[in-house]
Image (cartoon, grey):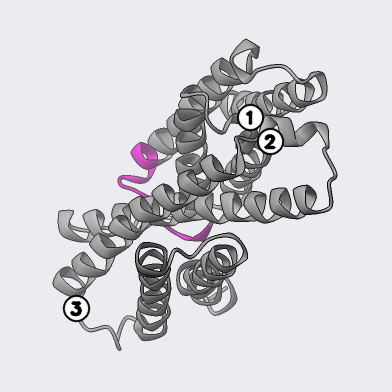
Amino acid sequence: MTFVLIAILAYLAAAAALVVEVRRERGSRASLWLPLSVVAIALHLTAHVVAWRQAGGPDLHFFAALSLVGLGMAMLTALVGAMGRMAALGVIVMPLAALALAGYHWQGHTPATQLDWRLQMHAWCALLAYATLAVAALLAVMLWVQEGALRRREFHAWLRALPPLVELETLLFRTIAVGFALLTATLLTGVLFVENLFAQHLVHKTVLSVLSWLAFGALLLGRWRLGWRGATAVRWTLSAMALLVLAFFGSKFVLELLLAPR
C-alpha cells in the first residue's frame, strides 16, 4: 500500500531531521521532525485499521504486535518531544517504528484471532506496557551513555540534544512508573480473563512477565527508599526489560514462527 511506504519514509525523514538538528546544535522545536512524525504515526495507524477491516478483527500475531509496539513508542516519543523534553529519542525510535511497520506490511498479515472485549483489553494493556517500558529502556541506555561521556569529559554535540542528567533520570523513572502501572493492569486482566494457562502455553510467558514486574517494582521501590540512580537504575531497567521481551516476543516468536504449522 502506498501510504505504508509514505509512513516509512516519513519516519526516516523525521529521524534525519533530528540528526541534522543535533549536528547544527539547534533546538528541536525549529525542526520538521514533529509534523513528519505525526504524518508517519497517522499512516502507521491507518495501515493497521485497514488490515483489521479486511481481516474482520484485530491481528495481534508476532509482526503485528511488533508493529503496534513500534507505533506506541513513536506516539510516546512524539508526545514527549512536543513538550520539548526528549526529542532526540526519535533518532532511535522513528527508524525502529519504520522497520516494525515494514516487517508487518511485508511479512506479518495473518487471519484475525477472535477475542472478546476482556481479552482485547488485556492485549491492549500489554502492548501499551511494552511500548512504554521499551521507551524507558532506551532512556536508560541514553542515561548510561551520557553519564559515561560526562565522566570521560567528552562533550559531543549530541550531548547538547539531551536534557540535563537529572532531568533525563527523572523522565526515565516517570516513564517506568507509567509502564509499571500498565504492566500491573496487564497482569491483573490476565489473571481475571485468561483461562487455562497450561493449555494455552502461557505459563512461561506469565512467569517471565511476573519476574519483570517484580524487577521494575523493586527498582521503583529502590528509587523511593534508597535513592537508586545512575548505573544501578540502568542495570535494573535493562534486566527487567529483557525479561519482558522474552516473555512476550520471545514466546510469540517460538509459538507463532518456529513451531507454527507450515
Any magenta on residue 57? yes
Number of marks in the image? 3
- Residue occupying image coordinates x 45% and y 37%: 76
- Residue occupying image coordinates x 60% and y 51%: 138
User: In the picture, which quadrant includes the N terminus?
Assistant: top right
Q: Which residue is mark 2?
A: 91
User: In the picture, which quadrant includes the C terminus?
Assistant: bottom right
Which sits in the foreground, 219 or 44?
A: 219
Amino acid on which disc 1 is placed: Tyr
Residue 256 in picture, x, y percent from top left: 50, 70
Q: Which residue is mark 1?
A: 11
Within 10 Å of disc 1 (Cα), the crowding (few <14, some 14-19, many 20+) is: many
- Residue occupying image coordinates x 52% and y 64%: 237
Asked if residue 34 is positioned above or below residue 158 in the image, the reply reads: above
**Alpha carbon separation for disc pair 1 and 3:** 39 Å
Residue 49 in picture, x, y percent from top left: 38, 35
- Residue occupying image coordinates x 76% and y 34%: 158
**Alpha carbon separation for disc pair 2 and 1:** 10 Å
**Alpha carbon separation for disc pair 3 and 2:** 41 Å
Any magenta on residue 60? yes
What is the quadrant of residue 215 in the picture?
bottom left
Q: Secondary structure at mark 3?
A: loop
Asked if residue 159 is positioned above or below residue 83 in the image, the reply reads: below
Q: Which residue is mark 3?
A: 195
Q: Is residue 173 left or right of residue 58?
A: right
Asked if residue 198 is positioned above or below residue 138 in the image, the reply reads: below
Amino acid on which disc 2 is placed: Val
What is the quadrant of residue 140 in the picture?
bottom right
Within 10 Å of disc 3 (Cα), the crowding (few <14, some 14-19, many 20+) is: few
Asked if residue 256 is positioned above or below residue 183 in the image, the reply reads: below
